[in-house]
Amino acid sequence: MSRLFFALDISTTDKNLIDEYRERCIFTDFKPVSKNNLHITLCFLGAVSTLQQQVLITKANVLAKTLYPIAPHQLLLNKLSLFKKPKIIYLTSNHTPKWLLTLASELSSCAKDLTLFQENRPYLAHISIYRKASFLPKVNPSPQLNITIESFSLYQSTSTDNGVAYQKIKTWVLL
């Protein structure tokens, strides 16, 4: 069993943009999420068998073809917020595009069909940028970060001595 999730990929350029904003404009000592781990989760899957993984990849192949070709999508990250219980500070957008809602919903539906637990709440596209946060820190200026989405991937989450590491298993290009 592997611990898996689907996520939108963030380019190195956009990861640098987010990291620079975080360093320059957010005033806190909270634990930053590693720049290499920045992503936008589409669907958390949890422990997945090899057979379930094969079905998920097949479904993602079909979804990518139905979304293809989409122009590279700009996603405006213009809001900083806090998940209080898991103590996560995240960047999000005031507007989630229809293609993104559809992709997240379809992947979640497939996971449910495979009896993989899915939380019953509206999808929120976000990038976790700090952990162990007890409050929302001062920010100046507010975020206005345009990132480009060109692909999504199936990732495996692995615990290491240096924290969690995310490894791409398969990527689907949306261009």
Image (cartoon, rainbow, N blue to C red):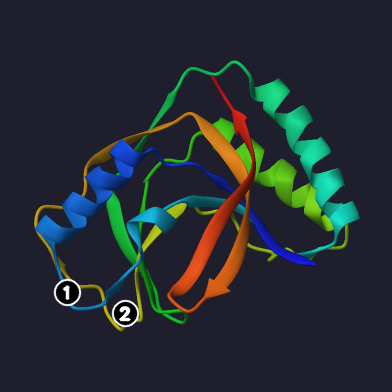
Q: What secondary structure is found at the residue carrying circle 1?
A: loop
* Mark 2 and mark 1 residues within 8 Å of each other at the beta carbon: yes
Residue 145 appears in the picture as rendered: yes
Towards the viewer: 166 or 68: 166
Q: Quadrant of the N terminus?
A: bottom right
Which x, y percent locates residue 155? 62, 52
Residue 120: quadrant of the picture: bottom right
**What residue is disc 2 on?**
133
Residue 28 numbered tag: 1
Which x, y percent locates residue 71? 48, 17
Q: What residue is rendered at 78% in x and 49% in y?
A: 109
Q: What residue is rendered at 56% in x and 33% in y?
A: 98
Residue 44 appears in the picture as rendered: no
Q: What secondary structure is found at the residue carrying circle 2?
A: loop
Left or right: residue 141 compared with residue 11: left
Residue 119 numbered tag: none
Label 1 crowd (10 A; few <14 / some 14-19 / many >=20): some
In primary-sequence order, the first of circles 2 and 1 is: 1
Indicate whether 62 appears above or below 125.
Answer: above
Q: Amino acid at mark 2?
A: Ala
Residue 80: quadrant of the picture: bottom left
Q: What residue is rendered at 56% in x and 48% in y?
A: 7
Which x, y percent locates residue 137? 19, 72
Towards the viewer: 136 or 12: 12
Q: Amino acid at mark 1?
A: Thr
Indicate whether 132 appears above or below 92.
Answer: below
Left or right: residue 61 compared with residue 163: right
